[in-house]
Image (cartoon, helix red, strand yellow):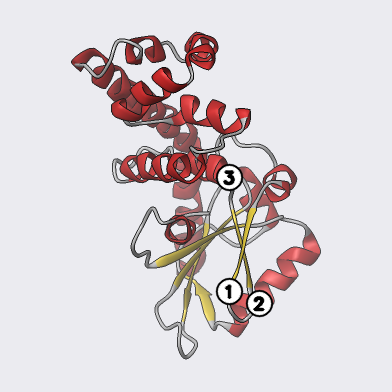
Amino acid sequence: MGGQACVFYGAAQVSKDIDILILSEPDNLVRLEAAIQQLQGRRIAVPPFSAAVLDRGHAVHFRCDASGVQGLRVDVMSRLRASPDFAAMWERRTTFVDETDLEYHLLCVPDLVHAKKTQRSKDWPVIELLVTIHYRENMSDPSQRHIDFWFREARSAELLVELCRRFPEQMKKQSQARPLISLAAEGVNDELRAALDAEVRAEQAKDRAYWEPLRRELEQFRRDHRDGGAR
């Protein structure tokens, strides 16, 4: 669901960690724990590994020591900010199969774009690239779902202008939900770029607000961990 997924889609060149989204049911957590043990993984930070912690929205972090994956970090989550439940995202996932018939299940591009809307500045160029690649791959025969996604998530002023020129009827409808689309109808200009920047700042603020109570919980986890260690 993170950088590795972006690598599959061609929107990143390298990612040092593996971020995975899981269904936090008891049997599934047992299977995950067995896989982590096979990788000689150790939890490297708070919070603890439990369904309750995952379902609150926290990420649990592991560092692997097995041969071939030394130092690999695996981050596990079961809930993403303002996203549908796991079942819905699993239903619309993208599956890649390599030459050995090994399957890789990824968040679909729209879900991945949503997941990358964080307070970190480095994620926003990746979002722009994901949407641009998706457009280039589907532009010759787009579905209505594709067009709606591009209008909703395009981060490039140039791409928005092109969308307005190609799909004027959809532009009128989409501009009601995303007013800056009306600016794109006038061409690339400073006002459009400023509006795009304002969207980023607004999403970053939402992400900070979402994580603030979880950060306070993490601090409590750290205090409990220190106190437990001292005893």
**What amino acid is labelled 3 in the image?**
Gly
Q: Which residue is mark 3?
A: 57
Residue in view at x 45 percent, y 30 percent: 153
Q: Secondary structure at mark 2?
A: loop
Give the image quarter of residue 203: top left
What's the distance in space between the residues labelled 3 and 2, CA to CA? Answer: 33 Å
Q: Which residue is mark 1?
A: 98
SS at mark 1 in the image: loop
* Amino acid type indicated by mark 1: Asp
Viewer-closest of 186 and 82: 186
CA gap between label 3 and label 1 equals 31 Å
Q: Is residue 3 left or right of residue 78?
A: left
Instruction: Please identify, in this view, whether the residue under mark 3 or under mark 1 is nearer the observer.
Output: 1
Three-letter amino acid code at disc 2? Asp
Q: Residues within 10 Å of mark 2 (few under 14, many from 20)?
A: few
Give the residue furthest to the front: 140
Q: Earlier in the sequence, mark 3 or mark 1?
A: 3
Disc 3 and disc 1 in contact, CB within 8 angstroms: no
Q: Residue at x 23, y 13 (%)?
A: 191
The image shows residue 179, relative to residue 105, as above or below, that is: above
